Amino acid sequence: MTSTSLVLVAGIIFIAVAIKVAPHFARRMSKPSSSKTDDAEALRRHRILSSQLYFDVPPSKVPLIYSSSYDISFLGIEKLHPFDSSKWGRICRFLTKEGIMDQKHVVEPVEATKDDLLVVHSESYLKSLNSSLNVSMIVEVPPVAMLPNFLVQKKVLHPFRKQVGGTILAAKLAKERGWAINVGGGFHHCSAERGGGFCVYADISLCIHYAFVRLNISRVIIIDLDAHQGNGHEMDFSEDRRVFILDMYNPGIYPLDFEARRYIDLGVEVKSGTTTDEYLAKLDHALEVAEKKFEPELVVYNAGTDILDGDPLGRLKISPEGIASRDEKVFRFARGRNIPLIMLTSGGYMKSSAKVIADSIINLSNKSLIDMKSLPTAKA
């Protein structure tokens, strides 16, 4: 046998052995990584079980969650972003004025702590929020970069953390009462490692992880009807088959996150200029398809009003009545199947959004899809 042949035979033997051994070697190499994953999951579970964000709510309260701390106001800098950062309080004032809500019956959440946020976020991401410059880029208000960080924490991040507490608590209330509305929340552009688009904390992802552990829920559908793609929760649950994502969004606007789009289970594109009738027809079809593909135990409804006609960022042409019909359809989808539902108000960049949301909640009450009447507290 020539030397060339010997080299060829040796090469073939080496490749054969390598193919046989490689899987075993890979499994051995993966063990430390698997162990680290198990440790991380155990720590996550411990943090969730130790959290104070879940608490018992008396029947005298309705499952509508709000705090005056939600609203962001500091020296007028909030007006430098198109988002109406006083929207949340104005929604409640409209509801009170219409006699649909009594402030004393509203549930006030607890602010999410660092340990609560670490359930999803990394230590490095949370540390990055100690930079006012970084926060200014996430909330898209450049002057925030000039503020001392203790003011940014108090005036900007505290309201967001309070809303995160509201979103997480909403799942518990929905499991107990059938539905819950967090008047804030819906920060769907934020993922575990990155904020953006006025979204600092991943409240949707946090809410779902808490529900997995504390509520023994194993299948969740996110119905994201904000005009913008929900790229944050899409990245967070990219490999998690317990979560089904239905996202109706305008593909021609922010965030244009093509990687995250790969993780949408049911994507429905609604291009700029889409009108009410076309939008609602697409929603009807999407809900029918979702029902056949997935059986959820919890619905997380991201109900952005930036689809409203005239919204400068959403670029769709949905009427106020269309938004009320949209919300009604989602509530009928969940309530008709006895699936707990939480609603988050998410995006909306016109002053009229607050009244539109309030009117929609009133419509849900009038249609008996929610009950805004509190129950009397039992006497001892």
Image (cartoon, rainbow, N blue to C red):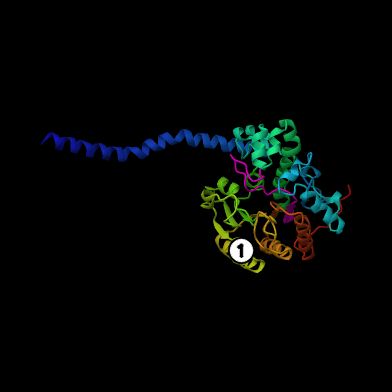
Q: How many marks?
A: 1
- Where's residue 42, x and y in %? 59, 36
Quadrant location of the N terminus?
top left
Q: From the viewer's perspective, is 108 left or right of 261?
A: right
- Could you say which is closer to the camera, residue 107 or residue 138? 138
Residue 7 to residue 263: above or below: above
Can see residue 78?
yes
Q: Is residue 170 left or right of residue 274?
A: right
Residue 200 visible at all: no
Q: Position of residue 229 (x, y in %)?
A: 60, 53
Give the structural element (helix, strand or loop) at label 1. helix
Please state which of residues 318 and 39 is positioned toward the viewer in this rendering. Answer: 318
Front-lying residue, 166 or 267? 267
Q: Which secondary structure class fits the magenta region best?
A: loop
Residue in the image at 47% along x and 33% along y:
32
Q: Residue at x 81, y 48 (%)?
A: 58
| Horizontal arrangement in the rendering, residue 375 relative to residue 166 (left or right) | right
**On screen, 192 above or below 131?**
below
Q: Does residue 110 belong to the magenta stretch?
A: no
Residue 329 quadrant: bottom right
The 10 Å Cα crowd at callout 1, few under 14, some 14 to 19, many 20 or more, is: some
Q: Quadrant of residue 248?
A: bottom right
Is 192 in the magenta?
yes
- Tell me the kind of residue under disc 1: Leu
Q: Please say if 373 is above or below 130.
A: below
Q: Please report the bounds of the magenta region as a residue range.
A: 177-199
Q: Nearer the viewer, residue 220 or 282?
A: 282
Q: Which residue is mark 1?
A: 287
The image shows residue 72 at horizontal and vertical percentages of: 76, 43
The x, y position of residue 361, in whole percent, is 77, 59
